[in-house]
Amino acid sequence: MAEQLSIFELISNASLLVQGVMALLVLASVVSWMMIFQRWFFLRRAQAEVEDFEEHFWSGIDLRKFFVELEREESLNGIENIFASGFREYTRLTEQTGIDADAVMQGVQRTMRVAVNREEARLETHLPFLATVGSTSPYVGLFGTVWGIMNSFRSLANMSQATLASVAPGISEALVATAMGLFAAIPAVIAYNRFSARVEILMKRYEAFADEVSTILHRAAHTRIEES
Amino acid sequence: MYWLRQYSAPFVLALGLHGIAAWALYSGWTPEQKQLNVVRPQAVMANLLVLEPKARPAPAPVSKPVAQPTPTAKPKPVSPPKEDSALAEKKKADALKAKQEQEKADRLAEQERDRLERQQRLNELAQSSLEQAISTESANLQAGTAEMVAQSYQLGIYDLVRQNWSRPPSARNGMSAKLLVELIPTGEVVAVSVVESSGSTAFDRSAEQAVRRARRFEVPQDNAIFEENFRQFYFLFQPEDLLR
């Protein structure tokens, strides 16, 4: 037992199918980690934006001025988008005459609901991918392992004498596939759970904020109609 | 453009993470194989030491009632002389009776003496046999410990040879080779030779090679035990764990 089996030797000795499975799992792991980092940055930024925006919003600033300020920005995302779309709809509807306050409010609420849904979709991108990797890559790895062990035992049948040393490398290299599957799956599952919890929290805040905006606009619409 | 900005940093990070993982796996993969230098605790080598029944004295054969006092003096019906008169007859009968009584007393006394003597001898015998038993037993024990020590070292030697043995492809279960091994008191192997072949030269050679490769065995410090068991000994090499 002078020579030690390096893990890379094990991989290079494995059969083609097992190697394919391993490559797939490495790819899945890389991509899922990419998604994890991307989502991590994205959600962190979204969270910070919400904090910033709400602080700004409730600081007693004039909403119309605030809206104009927002419209000047090149891209709106997250909570800004919800507010901007609601307020845009409100100004558009109130500019036209003959629309009563309830109809205005219905329009505003609908637009904001659409915006909230769109934001939800943006927050949740890639999460299904993480869920898929988390749930399937153990099976893929297991498949590679079973295949490798099958072959290793089949080749054993041709030998006149079976020693542990003749089976062990095959089993070891087959088990590498399972290890890789788990290596890909565990972070993906953890990240999926964590990120979906954070998305849920953010969604709660978005919805609450949308309700608050519609309350404000509701009040404004009714007073305006009565004045006119 | 947007895609590139969003995903380039995560991509680099993910690749870096996997690179680190692969490197860690590569550098930390081979655990250094430590040569385990296990000192076999000899106190634990339990060896059932049966107190041989031969240590017990055979029930003293002397205790058999050998001295069966043969009634030597049998009242012999002496052939009565024909010419006896009544007086003579009576006298004679009296004398006979007296004689018989005397004899009877004598016999009783003798029996008593005999009995006492036997008792004493039995006592003596019991004493001596007890002492003898004790001494033989302790001798046995001593021999037993020496044997035990020798045995534990033999096991160690066997293990060492097994470790150094590389199994030839032709090895089969049940093969055994008898080797004559000569050691010097430091435990170094000075000579190995095959005494009884297993039938497979490859196996014989591998066994011999294993002994040579071990080079040095642990041997007892006690010179007597060494001389008796390890100066020159036969080594039956018979690995049993082969599958077929």
Image: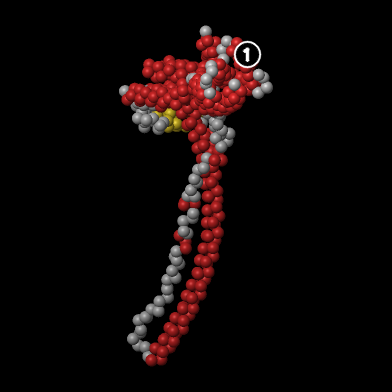
Q: What residue is disc 1 on?
A: A69
Pick the quarter of the image with the C terminus of chain A. Answer: top right
Q: Amino acid at mark 1?
A: Glu
Q: Position of residue B244 (x, y in %)?
A: 35, 30
Q: Is residue A51 visible?
A: no
Task: Say if B130 sits above or below B211 in the image.
Answer: below
Give the residue displayed 46% in from the left and 83% down from the top: B98
Circle 1 marks a residue in which chain? Answer: A
Residue at 52 percent across and 56 percent down: it is B129
Which corner quadrant of the image does residue B78 belong to? bottom left
Q: Residue furthest top?
A: B1
**As displayed, is residue B124 above or below residue B70?**
above
Q: Residues within 10 Å of mark 1 (few under 14, many from 20)?
A: few
Residue name at image x 52 percent, y 46 percent: B140
B109 and A203: which is toward the camera: A203
Q: Nearer the viewer, residue B178 or B152?
A: B152
Image x and y of residue B133, in percent: 52, 53
Note whether B154 is above or below B73 in the view shown. Answer: above
Residue at 39 percent across and 88 percent down: it is B89
| Towards the viewer: B210 or A41 | A41
Label 1 SS: helix
Q: Quadrant of residue B100?
A: bottom left
